[in-house]
Image: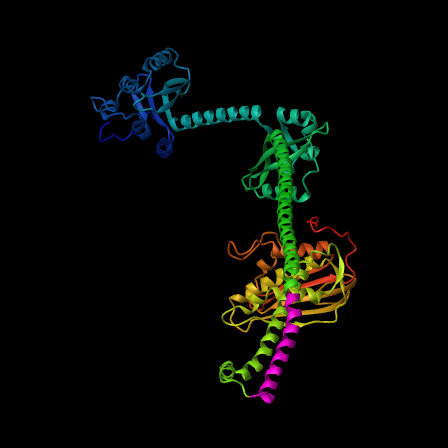
């Protein structure tokens, strides 16, 4: 195309008599230049009568084509030759042109594709123009419809893709379309097959027809709230078919919005997940069953462990009782012999000392050798010290008897089942066995403060109760070992009537012997306090406790004796264990030591 273009000639080729001709021609010229189409006109001789700038720009017509050698406008053939060079299929257009030459009255419309290097698509229109009743020439109009064709192509492709998607969805999914009120306007075959309703039964109805009543009102209220504001809703819904069977669908509801952004219809895409839900339900049942079985096995294992520990403890107590019986047999005889002989020895020694005094007082002067020996013996000191030695031996023998008796009372091997026993005696026996730990600390002993009430004889298993006292007192000593002084353990006993108001001791009706054992140790946090009666729970280092002492104690007091065992503790305020035993004993059976309830 030339760098300079000749301006299109004014439309004044023909003479008109109208006085407004200049204005009309100017209006026509402006109209032609304003149009988006490229326009050119030829007279019957093929000479150019007019063209607009858009035509020149569209085809890239050079000035040599538009202007003849003599200075006038160019000819049709030169313009046609240039256009043919631009076309992908010039032969067909040339044939069409020749037909128009043969039929001057004919109108023409065709789409021209330019060469692929250009890629444009031009729509061509042509019709003759008349002066009076005679044909004066022909006008050609060219429109660039490339973008329109691309848009149409894309639209056709989109329509095809949408059609393919709809076909695929129809084959694979359950589809439904509703209006803004939820009335079904479209239901595909899969919807009908799964719901057992026909299309006629579904269309015009709402989805309430398949409501299974499985979901509550809030479920559907939330669904409608979501889609009503134009958001997509996804979830799983259980529906009821016409025959009463139930099915599950994985649902996506898509709102279609109008120009105001308000939903005017809803498109629901669903997939049948009934089989999956049935598998999930079966799996959940299996998991629940497995969980129950696991819990039962854990409970059984815990019971077996507790039973094993209890059996070991019972064996220890049995062995301790046997040792106590053996000690009583082996030690009591020589101790009794010592007791009996000490009395005689004391009498003999007193007589001998008295005799020596009489010799010294009334006898003849002693031989020098005897006198020297008496002086060396320090008879006066011996006379004072020997009775003290005998008294000390007597106290030691009594102590041995007390220890053996306490050990025997603690184990109570000879007492099976429940009997009325003195609780204080059991506490004292336990304390006696713990004397070494109570007084053996290098930085000061643990003070035991006893405030005993007037307790009646309590019906219980003495050996078991002594075991509880031993466990609680041992734990108290453990807690105080790392504490600075003063270290104290307080033991209080009293009789309490059940059913009365006790701030820290809720008891049932009846009369209870209450034993409180408290220490001024560090106390314990709530998390530890809540677990101290759990089997195998311990805060001690490995090898320093099994975690079964208080668990077995709880079993003995609560399960075996129908009593209560409470723990009162706060960090920094020590720990108190409260035992409450029915004075008359529990109403339950009397289990044997090896058959205690777990």
Tag count in the figure?
0
Q: How is the image coloured?
A: rainbow
Q: Is residue 149 left or right of residue 86?
A: right
Q: Position of residue 152 (x, y in %)?
A: 44, 26
Q: Is residue 346 above or below residue 4?
A: below
Task: Classify the position of the N terminus by image quarter.
Answer: top left
Q: Residue at x 53, y 66 (%)?
A: 481
Q: Which residues are magenta?
A: 335-364
Q: Is residue 361 magenta?
A: yes
Main secondary structure type of the part rendered in magenta: helix
Q: Is residue 134 left or right of residue 336?
A: left
Q: Is residue 184 above or below residue 480?
A: above
Q: Foreground: 202 or 332?
A: 332
Q: Foreground: 336 or 532?
A: 336
Q: Position of residue 323 (x, y in %)?
A: 63, 56
Q: Is residue 253 left or right of residue 122?
A: right
Q: Foreground: 190 or 467?
A: 467
Q: Position of residue 541 (x, y in %)?
A: 51, 56
Q: Foreground: 473 or 559?
A: 473
Residue 467 seen in render: no
Q: Position of residue 266 (x, y in %)?
A: 59, 35
Q: Is residue 201 above or below residue 489?
A: above
Q: Is residue 87 magenta?
A: no
Residue 236 seen in render: yes
- The quarter of the picture where residue 271 lies is top right
Q: Residue at x 69, y 38 (%)?
A: 214
Outermost residue to the left: 69
């Amino acid at each position: 195309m030339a760098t300079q273009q000749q301006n299109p000639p004014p439309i004044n080729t023909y003479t008109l008599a109208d006085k407004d001709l200049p204005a009309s021609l100017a209006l026509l010229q402006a109209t032609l230049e304003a149009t988006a189409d490229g326009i050119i006109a030829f007279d019957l001789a093929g000479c150019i009568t007019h063209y607009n700038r858009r035509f020149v720009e569209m085809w890239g017509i050079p000035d040599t084509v538009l202007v003849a050698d003599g200075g006038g406008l160019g000819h049709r053939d030169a313009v046609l030759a240039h256009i043919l060079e631009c076309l992908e299929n010039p032969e067909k257009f040339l044939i069409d042109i020749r037909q128009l030459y043969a039929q001057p009255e004919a109108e023409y419309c065709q789409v021209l594709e330019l060469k692929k290097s250009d890629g444009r698509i031009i729509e061509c229109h042509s019709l003759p123009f008349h002066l009076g009743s005679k044909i004066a020439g022909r006008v050609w109009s060219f429109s660039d419809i490339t973008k329109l064709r691309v848009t149409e192509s894309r639209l056709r492709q989109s329509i095809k893709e949408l059609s393919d998607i709809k076909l695929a969805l129809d084959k694979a999914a359950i589809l439904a379309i509703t209006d803004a009120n939820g009335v079904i306007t479209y239901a595909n075959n899969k919807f009908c097959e799964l719901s057992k309703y026909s299309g006629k039964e579904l269309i015009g109805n709402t989805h309430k027809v398949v409501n299974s009543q499985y979901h509550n009102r809030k479920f559907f209220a939330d669904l409608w709230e979501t889609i009503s504001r134009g958001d997509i809703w996804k979830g799983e819904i259980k529906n009821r078919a016409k025959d009463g069977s139930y099915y599950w669908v994985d649902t996506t509801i898509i709102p279609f919005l109008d120009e105001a952004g308000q939903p005017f219809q809803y498109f629901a895409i669903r997939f049948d997940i009934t089989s999956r839900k049935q598998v999930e339900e079966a799996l959940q049942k299996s998991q629940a069953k497995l969980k129950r079985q696991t819990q039962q096995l854990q409970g059984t294992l815990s019971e077996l462990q507790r039973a094993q520990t209890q059996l070991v403890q019972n064996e220890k107590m049995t062995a301790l009782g046997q040792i106590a019986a053996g000690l009583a047999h082996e030690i009591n005889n020589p101790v009794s012999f010592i007791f009996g002989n000490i009395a005689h020895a004391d009498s003999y020694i007193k007589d001998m000392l008295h005799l020596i005094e009489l010799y010294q007082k009334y006898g003849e002067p002693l031989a020098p050798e005897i006198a020297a020996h008496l002086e060396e013996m320090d008879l006066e000191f011996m006379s004072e010290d020997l009775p003290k030695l005998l008294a000390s031996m007597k106290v030691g023998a009594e102590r041995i008897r007390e220890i053996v008796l306490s050990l025997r009372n603690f184990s109570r091997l000879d007492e099976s089942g429940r009997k009325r026993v003195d609780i204080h005696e059991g506490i004292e026996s336990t304390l006696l066995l713990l004397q070494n730990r109570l007084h053996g600390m290098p930085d000061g002993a643990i003070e035991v403060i006893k405030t005993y009430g007037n307790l009646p004889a309590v019906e219980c298993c003495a050996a078991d109760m002594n075991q509880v006292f031993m466990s609680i007192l041992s734990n108290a000593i453990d807690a105080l070992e790392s504490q600075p002084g003063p270290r104290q353990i307080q033991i209080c006993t009293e009789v309490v009537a059940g059913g009365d108001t006790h701030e820290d001791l809720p008891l049932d009706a009846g009369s209870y012997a209450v034993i409180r054992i408290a220490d001024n140790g560090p106390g314990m946090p709530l998390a530890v306090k809540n677990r101290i009666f759990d089997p195998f729970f311990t805060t001690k280092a490995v090898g320093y406790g099994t975690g079964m002492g208080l668990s077995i104690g709880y079993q003995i007091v609560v399960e075996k004796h129908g009593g209560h065992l409470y723990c009162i503790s706060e960090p920094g305020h020590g720990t108190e264990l409260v035992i409450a035993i029915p004075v008359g004993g529990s109403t339950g059976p009397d289990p044997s030591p090896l058959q205690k309830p777990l």
